[in-house]
Image (cartoon, coloured by chain):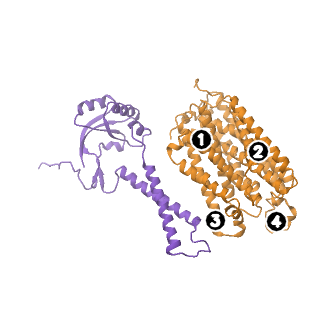
Amino acid sequence: MASLRTQFEVPGKMKTWSYALIGLGLAALLYGMFTKGFSSDEHEQVHFWGTLMYNTIFWTLICNASMFFISVTTLAQAGFTQTFRRIPEAISTLVPIFGAITFAVLMYIIFGHKHHIYHWLDTEAVAADPILKGKAGFLNPTFFVIWTTLTIALWSFLGWRIRKLNDEADAGPMDRETSDRFIYRGTVRTAMFTVWFGLTVGSTIPWLWMMSIDAHWYSTMYSWYTFVSSFVAGMSLIALWVIYLKNKGYLELTSQEHLHDIGKFMFAFSIFWTYLWFSQYMLIWYANIPEETVYFKHRTQGAYKGIFFFNLIVNFLCPLLILMKRSAKRNYTLVTFMAVLIIFGHWIDFYQMVMGSLMQDHVTLGWMDFGILAFFVGVMILYVGTALSKKPLIAKYHPYLKESVIHQV
Amino acid sequence: MAKKKFVVGCFDDEAVLFPAVKKVRTAGYKIHDVYTPFAVHGLDHAMGLRETSLHTAGFIYGITGTTTAISAISWIFTKDWPLNIGGKPHFALPAWIPIMFELTVLFAAVGMVLTFCYLCQLAPFVKKHHFHARATDDLFVMVIECTDKTNTDDLQAFLSSNGALETKVEVAEDGWWLGRYDKDEMPFEEKQIVAA
């Protein structure tokens, strides 16, 4: 164990790149904010705040997916994650930061009364609309603010408790009783996170943050669809960091066997995403009720047709055909390529979920989208790198570590 | 079916079996098979078996199923017997996807089970030679195929020195043949003549 390189140091190149990306992103963000976000034209405002909104939500959710991955693997008593568990932990330290940005953006929309984004903010329209009146118990600013605050605060807090508990596995060897107790406490803490995750990402949060843009429309699949979209992108992000650290000569105990399992998550949840995509689409297509088809009308027949089907090719066909083979999931180059593709694909998915409703007449994908994306990628690289350097890369007294080291697929 | 000569060695411990397999292979003997009471992790690598192509077969069966479904349904609903169902187009792809999926799974599953049985030589009304009855209970049974030049005594001694509890030489069928365990005799077995 003594020969392991467990102390990650942030390379200068990484810092340079992330500062460059953040700088570029901030320039695009600020330029967009002053030319569009604060312009007098409602259309331009919706363009900017919508773009910022789907980016913040996407990055918060995929970083939170890391904590969900830790939680479910802990609850399932899965040992194989131990050799690389500090990576999802480091990614999840971003939840408070991205969560705060998301919170600020959403609060600006709510208190700035941007009813062109959330139609239900318009009190006069709600009063005259029986459907929105029926939803007013759920879709109202008070509930939105309280629930959003609670959500982001509890994600951060419960995740922090889980990370803090795992620090005890750095301290020193545990005897049988201590390790049993350690596992039990981990189970309780991750169970609490999982329950809260189910109540938020698994149901209410996508309804509030994104589905309520189409205030009349509803789909029971929507939250699951959003969750899977963020989870599969989150797994890809973990895969990228694992491969990066392997390339730098860290994570000696993590092997192709672990990569294979991460690859299986990427493959399986891409299929699951497609299952939900299709279930949502087919039921609405089959029933053909105007108030439901309105969501797909401009996506399948309007300006977003290209994006809509591109989404399906990148997020379903590519993972299905490329990641299907065992050798592909064990190949570092292919997994890297697929991880980047999947993250990009699901970013596009979030793009069409939000902007497909806000800017129905034309596809707005352009410099502002990629600029804001660059900002988030830069922040992500910088913070995850810093978080990784603060703790040993392996919690070497964790009771399950041996199981993870000898893990074989 | 060809009868062949085999040398059989029985082990009662995995930890002895693995080095023995390795030594037998380095010595240049050809291992016919190792029969174990349960699936032993890593034994396939130790024996140098190649990765199975069963999943490739499964993929081919699967796309055969997809193709069968899409061609059958599209022919039926657009050419053979077009029906107006709720004003939907005749070529109603979303409605067909569940059926395409089901047929993909059906073809892949049934095809892979049958292929697996064929590769393992398992079927009703066929038999295979059992080298040692305790291979289904508590012994790991290594079977080595002999050539004309194999010195069976040497090989038996070699196996014993590597931890085999019991060794024997057998002449047996190497594959399957038609027959029933409850009715038939072994095809090569001499009828026992019971003295009066």
Q: Residue at x 66, y 47 (%)?
A: A344
Chain letter of the residue carrying label 1: A
Residue on which disc 4 sits: A133
Dot label at residue A99: 2
Q: Is label 1 on the same chain as label 4?
A: yes
Dot label at residue A336: 1
Indicate the colour of chain B: purple
**Element at badge 3?**
helix
Q: Please name the amino acid that badge 4 sits on.
A: Lys
Marked residue nearer the N-terminal end (3 or 1): 3
Marks 2/3: CA distance? 33 Å
Q: Residue at x 62, y 42 (%)?
A: A74
Marks 1/4: CA distance? 48 Å
Q: Please name the amino acid that badge 2 sits on.
A: Gly
C-beta proximity under 8 Å, tags 4 and 2? no
Residue on which disc 3 sits: A283
Q: Is residue A317 left or right of residue A164?
A: left
Tell me where residue A193 appears, x and y as whole percent: 69, 45
Marked residue nearer the N-terminal end (4 or 2): 2
Chain letter of the residue carrying label 4: A
**Element at badge 1?**
helix
**Element at badge 4?**
helix
Marked residue nearer the N-terminal end (2 or 3): 2
Marks 4/2: CA distance? 30 Å
Q: Residue at x 49, y 58 (%)?
A: B105
Marked residue nearer the N-terminal end (4 or 3): 4
